[in-house]
Amino acid sequence: MAATGARFPTTVQDLNPLFRSGILAATGNPAVANVVKQYGMRLGASRFVAGESFDEAVRVLRDLNQKGFRTNTTLLGEGVQDEATVRTVVDEYKRDLDRIAQENLTTNIALKLTQLGLNLDPTLAYRNVSEIVSHAADRGNFIRIDMEDSPLVDDTLRIYQRLRADGHENVGTVLQSYLYRTPDDLKTLEPLHPNLRLVKGAYLEPATVAYPEKSDVDRAYVDLAERMLTNNPFTAIATHDERIIDHVRGYAARHGYGNDHYEIQMLYGVRPQYQLDLARTGQRILIAAPYGPQWYMYLMRRLAERPANVIWFATNLVKR
């Protein structure tokens, strides 16, 4: 089916790419890192992070479930460089899945393959994610393989395809609309009838591989969303962009796609009132609520997404 190519006008609310680049560049500044890591959780990082331990996260996940939201969680951190640490991550995810089942939470797991050894050996990463996916299947749960920056896309998709070829059905992955390659990646995956999450993309990428203009990213997102809804059994629309959400919901309604066919996914702490308002309309909503002590990079990405987040965080810092 042909995509509509819907256009969304740029407004003063749209993210300034220079602002975003500046915040992301600042993440490597030791002075910035020291201040944020020292005071961040007390000054508001807990708005976006469900806790530093899974015990803390369980309380948040349970509260979200009681409000009518589905949830997922992830152990924050990426780029693990030694096998011993990789093993601790695998074991923690398996314990999390056990606890989710014990607590009867409506929660699944999202994970990054660089946590599971992708930078060391793709075969190691495959063995580890396969172990977690099997553990989840035994507990009736689902694993989402997050997408990372562009050099890792090929390995990530190969591992996802291998999991599916090996008979794992309770696993999905993520595509990013800002990458030029994504329409071709979607075409490659479509024969698998995949469960996919669509995001815009949060990594700082060069213009050689990703759209530098927000309007192009948004247009690509809408085209991909319509294609996924039309061709795939289930699609996760992950965005806080109200214009895109309205467009997708309208498209879904016109074509008879209900909550069994797609959901809106949003981040914990980002536009919480809007999340509640959507849920009250009967829309299926999943809230992603990550946890863990390595929350610094995640927080900085959230601050980079909206100038208002930086103003809010800086105000708390000044008040301390």
Image (cartoon, rainbow, N blue to C red):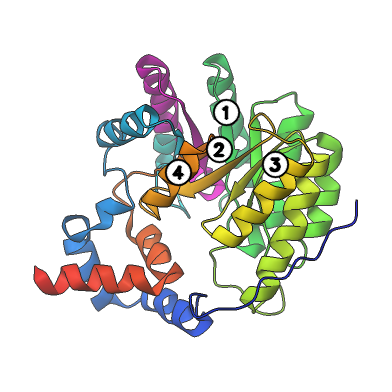
- Tell which circle, 1 or 3, labels the residue nearer the N-terminal end: 1
Answer with mark 3 or mark 2, whichever residue precedes in sequence: 3
Q: Earlier in the sequence, mark 4 or mark 3?
A: 3
SS label for mark 3: helix
The nearer-to-camera label among 4 and 3 is 4
Inspect the magenta stretch and tell me whether residue 241 lies in it. no
**Structural crowding at the residue carrying mark 2, measured as other residues with C-alpha within 10 Å and reported as few (<14), some (14–19) or many (≥20):** some
Q: Which span is picked out in magenta?
A: 90-116
Q: CA distance from mark 3 to mark 2?
A: 32 Å
Q: CA distance from mark 1 to mark 4?
A: 14 Å
Where, by quadrant of the figure, is residue 144 drawn?
Answer: top right
Q: Is residue 173 left or right of residue 316?
A: right
Where the C terminus falls, by quadrant?
bottom left
Label 1: few (<14), some (14–19) or many (≥20) C-alpha neighbours in 10 Å: many
Cα distance between the residues tagged 4 and 3: 23 Å
Going by the numbered disc 1, the residue's amino acid type is Phe
Of the residues tagged 1 and 3, which is closer to the observer? 1
Disc nearer the start of the sequence (1/2): 1
Residue type of the residue flagged with mark 2:
Gln
Instruction: Work out whether residue 281 can be spotted.
Output: yes
User: Residue at label 2?
Assistant: 283
The kind of secondary structure the magenta stretch mainly shows is: helix
10 Å neighbourhood of mark 4: few (<14), some, or many (≥20)?
Answer: many
**Marks 1/2: CA distance?**
21 Å
Q: Which residue is mark 1?
A: 142
Residue under the point 80% across and 35% down:
193
In front of the other: label 4 or label 2?
A: 2
Residue beneath the point at 44% across and 26% down? 94
Q: Which mark is residue 159?
A: 3
Residue occupied by mark 4:
288
